[in-house]
Image: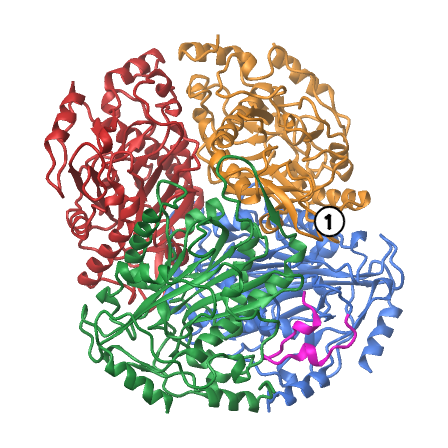
Chain colours: A orange, B red, C blue, D green
């Protein structure tokens, strides 16, 4: 039912370029509400924004329908921006990244590796808009006068939305990137096919943005945001249950294609080499959903810590806090759990989408997932 | 029942040093025979030795009981040797390695990274015997006159067996290493608490050596051998089912401790940079068993290819075969699946072990696993 | 004398945007012609284009003078494009990269690391034009229909020309990138402040593009092209002689600032992991000129091999040639030597440049270099 | 003259095993005293021990002469131990490592990468004694009761002394390793063919241990110790002068063979990712002596910081000091300079050595070096 309506909505919208989001999906829109069991204790929002200071903004571009005409649409794409300390606090954060499979792009990583810092926002978009987004971030950053060096090395990552979007049409413009950056806010994060995730598919269901968080004993939290665009149907596991095999309908891939960007935020005081350890755990959350990180996948992960706001002082030695390695296990566990749940949240939230050449990607059917979980004795409550 | 008998056996044996193995465990000793479902098609032996040419040898050291007296025992340790092309063919193999969590040792990795070759055997033992094993391999290698360079850079990896073994007693001697090397053979591979895995525990059950393989469409195969010594009980998942929580008995860890070495063999013609991709997939098989790669874990993975026997020619350009990146997905899938199954095979095969200070580590109770799988609708047949 | 004339030239040019190059510098324009001694045997052109198939194109943008007005100029920038197999042969090349100091950007590196291939051109430009160049390459690539995957991961690298150029003015446009790509040709390569090197400085002299090559015993060649924009005067060593200290005039830096991109081409059949070894040798050539790879430096190196044209076959195992590791020393030596000479060639060729806010960067004074070399008994002939 | 006497000395000594050192070389034994110019300001000792707390101990093994009889000698080998905080303070130090060319062994690096800490001493010896040294460190460490984890992951590195030493004879025993550890002290460091460097050659001269240091503006210091065993004669550059070509006598290599271990100590408060930056600069000091890091070279570098003595606290978040990246350039410069000088110091101090099969490796002839420097206008004073 709701699928039909979503399609209808998409058909009606064809102002180009449009900054818009579809109506909320009916019923539960988060995995837990559906009765899917997850380990660990999420934060209040079960979102990356549970890590104090982190803000997220989306620009969603939906326009046109029918046959692909490069440059004219259909448009199913957008931009998601994550600001580690929000708009008001441009101080760099300690960061690290990891490539589980590098068939993708994340700009700015050489400097993250070298300096240990992420100096600005993280922007997620489609593959062919990385350049535009990089330029837009540069201009916006210069205009705000917050740069730490004379030059700027923006961090822009991507997944490929060519199945649904006129991706070679370059529909993301500078203003869309700025809109995502300027609209970034704390609080609940819109999920599914919104922002950079608008045209994404995941296990041959509609995919896109998902988020989750974990509260760790003793205070620190870890939050994850994914732009999920990977996987073949038969691989999908939810809470260890082979859901993909139980719902074989409406698949469209002859082979694996796609990627996932995973961003991990924590307020635990971790140094860059410790954040690299967190980034490497994203692989394990991804693995729990059934992925094997296919050859075509750009599985690129970035972790940052909002602790140590004064760490980027340039002129004198500074004191920074460090959590002992012996205290990291709960954060590792939290990262794995939140990465897994964020992916499932993306699936649960995403709406059936019809895009380029009338390619139709169905939403994860909620009731059938519940039925499968019941069959495997895994439905919560 | 069988547990009691195993204990009895251990009590009776206290010749030191003894090269011995316990009696076979009663009933099914492999995960599939127990009805645990796994994806993919294993090779004939469902072992790393399904990759033609690969041979494996174990030396198992079991002696003494009761209170730890450093140097006197109890001894629960050993050596496992993997020869990529067997004893008769000392030609190097293309290889690569990956550290998912580096709280461990694998010697010789700088040269693997640099040269793209593994030039000799892989030896697995306990942590404090790495030096002895390295020296032993050097001497054995020199004596055989097969070295490619004037110096030798042996590959020896370890996990820590201090819970069951007098690990600071240095009970592994040169002769034990040579025995493992010289006894390496094709065919079925002994699993559980044998060889380097003798004193190992996994998810607070008895652990150690496990193996599995996958046949890939079009011919190539991938085989995995693990020395598994990691995990806390509540983390254990078998075929996606939370088995660890359903069998909470006889745990003994206040926190995660331990490691896993994963060795991946393939006969697919992969170049070193492609083998690194395989090595990185071991993480995903490990994740499926519930691990989060704890801080104390030395999760070190090595992948090699038995193809291209002439690749190490020193004097002229050679032709080597390479599988296209676009054809790697089935090997990725096979690696993830075989790594997962090899770990579960280690658990299924390992016998209850009583070691140092009467520490008793129970075997995975087969019938209870079957009961749990039945409850979760996952028992095969 | 010639300096004055160069300034005059720049003053006269202020059409914006202009695609132009200054007149050739008077007298010898290459380091060897000046009598600077170098080891090894260069190829016929002593250029990266000595590696058969490699082509290079420049777009040079020079316009305006006087006070910086962001968006209006002065403009001293451009684009350099390297096509590993030329325009006609879009087949990927085996490649690898290395970051000696990551304060810079080279896009597309995650996929180079993962796949072992460089699939398209390498584009060098200024820092803030990386996005524009990435988009331009994407469009150009799609238009040519030569892509190997549905998405494109262009390789664009940069150094910062903000001392001479209105770098925040985004003067590099898509057409300039395409012009560099389309004009790429074999034969001699223009050096100094041309192409992506137009606004660059090196050891506080005018810098930019330089190139060199070495012929190795037995046939293979190695060619290097640099975009040099690093170093403080006192550090400069030429042929081991402390030239920088002997010519302390007209310095303008209070601290190290800048970067160097080094591209290494070879026709030797090297696999990706061997090309990484070549890339790491670029550091050693750089070190010989006196650099210590300062914190502000984006010292990013990329090596590729034009051998194995059929290596990127997607559907079946292919045969590829590999030079034994034992045969790499001459290529290591050639890389170090050619990288050193390419940097000195950039200095020798670059003209005095007056840019933004009348910043004036002098050319390396040829006769004084000869005098210094004579003093240190190092002048050739 | 002194060469003849050194030979005589070696002939007279053949007690086996002997812990001994030859008599001091006549005349100046350090590069600066010879008039070789170096940049920067060394510390009081111009040694790694200028970094407060660092101690160094050597065990030198010299015995036998004439024809090689494996196991019987001749013996020209030893052990060098570096204790980052000396014997009394076993607290771990922040550390990182880098492989410029991995044809060698440094154990324990996976845990350095992962944890950011070096937990014990660094031991340097010959290639085939790495296992013995690793075991010895383990036992010594356990006996002292200072371990941070139940297991120990010793750091032992090597270069190959098979040209002069009966290296397959395994003459280094546990007691020799312990002797080096227990004798480690502050103050001047013996250089040349002592300790782990006893049987080493460098640019086909006698080589071995060398050390140097730099004082950086504002207080911090950087000290370097090398075990130098690399290079062919024609490559040798001293202070930029082609000394190797000017002294072509008594060479013995048909091709490059050998390695260098470079250890960098600093009291500057650097985090692990910053220490990796220091480690990467060792390449540049090495390059200045003429090396191209040949295929056969194990060029492995390790950097540690003695600051932050409380960083390894296990139970609670700690405050650690960090120098800003913007303040690292002087340390980069100091590392490059001290690495270069340490190598030249090894050459200047090493005595002519006659070893296995009467292989004779001459000492760097001091007066001839002075003559060459004079010719090239580079002799100091």
Residue named by callout 1: A148
| Residue in the foreground of this view, choosing between C344 and C213 | C344
Residue at point 72%, 36% (across, down): A171
In which quadrant of the rendered view does residue D32 lie? Answer: bottom right
The part of the image, by quadrant, that contains residue B100 is top left
Q: Is residue D299 visible?
A: no
| Left or right: B342, with A74 as reference point | left
Identify the residue at the far top of this view. A381
Could you tell me how many numbered marks the image carries?
Answer: 1
Q: Is residue C234 magenta?
A: yes
Q: Residue at x 35, y 51 (%)?
A: B95
Q: Residue C182 in the image: x percent, y percent?
A: 67, 59
Q: Is residue D313 left or right of residue D138?
A: right
| Residue situated in front as seen by the camera: A154 or C216 | A154
Quadrant in which the N terminus of chain B is drawn = top left
Question: On screen, B344 above or below D307?
Answer: above
Which of the chains bears the disc numbered 1? Answer: A
Q: Which residues are magenta?
A: C230-251
Q: Decide if residue D86 is in sight here.
A: yes
């Amino acid at each position: 039912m709701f699928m039909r309506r979503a399609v209808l909505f998409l058909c009606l919208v064809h102002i180009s370029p449009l900054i818009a989001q579809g109506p909320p999906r009916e019923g539960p829109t988060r995995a837990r509400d559906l009765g899917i069991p997850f380990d660990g204790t999420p934060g209040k929002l079960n979102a990356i924004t549970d890590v104090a200071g982190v803000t997220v903004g989306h620009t969603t571009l939906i326009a046109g329908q029918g046959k692909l005409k490069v440059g004219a649409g259909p448009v199913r794409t957008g931009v998601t921006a994550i600001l580690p300390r929000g708009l008001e606090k441009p101080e760099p954060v300690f960061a690290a990244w990891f490539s589980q499979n590098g068939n993708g792009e994340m700009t700015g990583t050489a400097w993250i590796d070298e300096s240990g810092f992420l100096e600005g926002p993280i922007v997620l978009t489609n593959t062919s808009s990385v350049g535009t987004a990089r330029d837009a971030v540069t201009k916006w950053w210069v205009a705000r006068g917050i740069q730490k060096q004379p030059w700027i090395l923006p961090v822009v990552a991507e997944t490929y939305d060519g199945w649904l979007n006129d991706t070679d049409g370059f529909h993301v413009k500078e203003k869309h990137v700025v809109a995502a950056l300027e609209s970034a806010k704390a609080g609940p994060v819109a999920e599914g096919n919104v922002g950079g995730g608008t045209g994404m598919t995941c296990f041959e269901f509609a995919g896109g943005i998902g988020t989750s968080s974990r509260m760790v004993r003793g205070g620190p939290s870890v939050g994850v945001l994914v732009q999920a665009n990977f996987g073949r149907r038969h691989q999908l596991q939810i809470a260890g249950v082979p859901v993909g095999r139980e719902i074989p309908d409406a698949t469209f891939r002859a082979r694996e294609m796609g990627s996932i960007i995973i961003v991990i935020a924590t307020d635990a005081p971790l140094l860059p080499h410790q954040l690299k350890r967190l980034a490497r755990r994203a692989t394990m959350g991804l693995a729990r959903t059934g992925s094997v990180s296919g050859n075509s996948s750009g599985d690129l992960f970035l972790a940052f810590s909002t602790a140590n706001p004064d760490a980027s002082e340039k002129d004198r030695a500074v004191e920074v806090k460090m959590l002992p390695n012996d205290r990291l296990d709960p954060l590792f566990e939290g990262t794995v759990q939140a990465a897994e749940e964020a992916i499932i949240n993306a699936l649960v939230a995403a709406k059936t989408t019809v895009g380029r050449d009338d390619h139709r990607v169905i939403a994860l059917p909620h009731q059938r997932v519940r039925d499968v979980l019941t069959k495997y004795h895994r439905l919560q409550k």
